[in-house]
Image (cartoon, rainbow, N blue to C red):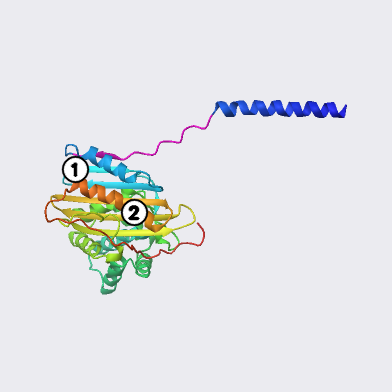
């Protein structure tokens, strides 16, 4: 009797298993959601399609998550990819810190002190973390958030506990910042904008990688990069750049994460940058294209031990 009961139980279990299997097979795993596509618009005939094609090709077979912003005032060209995705800022936030410092000084009708100028120069040209921490602490959250509000950078969230490198940024807000730095506006004075661009134009050669890759010698280059490694999303590697000359006035933001190494992320950014510069500013005779260092460097941003 016991044996027969056991047999029935086994048969029942098999039937239940079979029944459970049927819906599983029927509801096959849905196809992975298609990755977002690069979108471009331009007032110049054919340029948007060319940029979309070449940026997409530059990203082909590249692992990791990439967000891109391009804006060229001269041809009214815009390209975006994952423009609203958030990333840990790493050192790219240093441009925001300097802009906030200058915005606040303007409000109080004063120049930067000698100490502030020294800290600002180290922060931007050498990506000095200690200098950044001093200015971050001096400004405090109220002033930093005040600048972000004035700049319309509504999705940028300052890092807490002094961890400025964990500020949440996205392409849309970074492009807003670069637009403020590169054209007359009511948020930053002309002198402030010139000062930011001057320092971004003096970044040490070991940190002039990323968006300047492939930039023609006929344009001026201003850059600020950042990287950060954490247990989640691997290496974040970012680059902000503004470029002016040869009849163009454009800015590029590339934010990346889930990179296996820093150099992998740098290569991804530089592949994108080369495609953009080539399409926007075709080379004429006597014009060379910038080749960044083969040993890119950045200051290692302090982060909490977990995460």
> Is residue 160 positioned above or below 25 on the image?
below
Camera-nearest label, 2 or 1 = 2
Closer-to-camera residue (215/233): 215
Q: Is residue 180 magenta?
A: no
Q: Which residue is mark 1?
A: 76
**Magenta-drawn stretch, dominant element (helix, strand or loop):** loop
Q: Farthest residue in the left direction?
A: 285
Magenta range is: 28-42
Residue 37 visible in rendering: yes
Q: Splitting the image into 4 quarters, where does residue 199 fall? A: bottom left
Work out which quarter of the rendered image holds the N terminus and state it: top right
Does 71 sit left or right of 268 as displayed? Answer: left
Does 178 sit left or right of 24 as displayed? Answer: left
Q: Badge 2: few (under 14), some or many (20 or more) residues near its Cα, within 10 Å?
A: some
Q: Secondary structure at mark 1?
A: loop
Q: Which residue is mark 2?
A: 267
Q: What is the count of numbered marks?
A: 2
Residue 159 visible in rendering: no
Does 307 sit left or right of 4 as displayed? Answer: left
> Is residue 110 positioned above or below 88 on the image?
below
Tell me the residue at 43%/36% (across/down): 33
Q: Splitting the image into 4 quarters, where does residue 146 fall? A: bottom left
Q: Earlier in the sequence, mark 2 or mark 1?
A: 1
Spot occupied by residue 100 in the image (x, y as percentages of width and height): 30, 60
User: How far separated are the C-alphas under marks 2 and 1?
Assistant: 27 Å
Closer-to-camera residue (204/285): 285
């Amino acid at each position: 009797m016991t044996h027969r009961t056991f047999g029935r139980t086994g048969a029942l279990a098999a039937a239940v298993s079979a029944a459970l299997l049927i819906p599983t097979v029927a509801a096959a795993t849905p196809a992975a959601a298609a990755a977002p596509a690069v979108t471009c618009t331009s007032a110049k005939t054919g340029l948007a399609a060319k940029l979309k094609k070449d940026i997409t090709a530059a990203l082909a077979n590249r692992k990791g998550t990439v967000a891109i912003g391009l804006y060229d005032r001269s041809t009214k060209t815009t390209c975006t990819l994952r423009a609203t995705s958030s990333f840990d800022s790493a050192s790219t936030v240093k441009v925001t810190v300097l802009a906030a410092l200058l915005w606040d000084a303007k409000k109080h009708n004063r120049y930067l002190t000698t100490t502030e100028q020294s800290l600002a120069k180290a922060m931007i040209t050498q990506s000095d973390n200690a200098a950044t921490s001093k200015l971050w602490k001096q400004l405090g959250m109220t002033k930093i958030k005040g600048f972000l509000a004035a700049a319309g950078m509504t999705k940028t969230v300052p890092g807490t506990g002094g961890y400025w490198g964990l500020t949440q940024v996205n392409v849309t807000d970074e492009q807003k910042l670069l637009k403020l730095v590169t054209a007359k506006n009511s948020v930053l004075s002309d002198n402030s904008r010139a000062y930011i661009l001057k320092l971004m134009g003096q970044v040490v050669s070991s940190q002039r990688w990323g968006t300047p890759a492939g930039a023609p010698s006929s344009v001026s280059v201003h850059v600020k990069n950042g990287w950060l490694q954490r247990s989640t999303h691997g290496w974040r590697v970012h680059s902000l750049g503004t470029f002016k000359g040869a009849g163009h006035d454009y800015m590029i933001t590339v934010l990346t994460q889930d990179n296996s190494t820093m150099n992998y992320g740098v290569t991804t950014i530089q592949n994108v940058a080369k495609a953009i510069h080539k399409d926007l500013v075709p080379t004429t005779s006597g014009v060379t294209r910038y080749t960044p260092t083969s040993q890119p460097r950045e200051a290692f941003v302090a982060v909490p031990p977990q995460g």
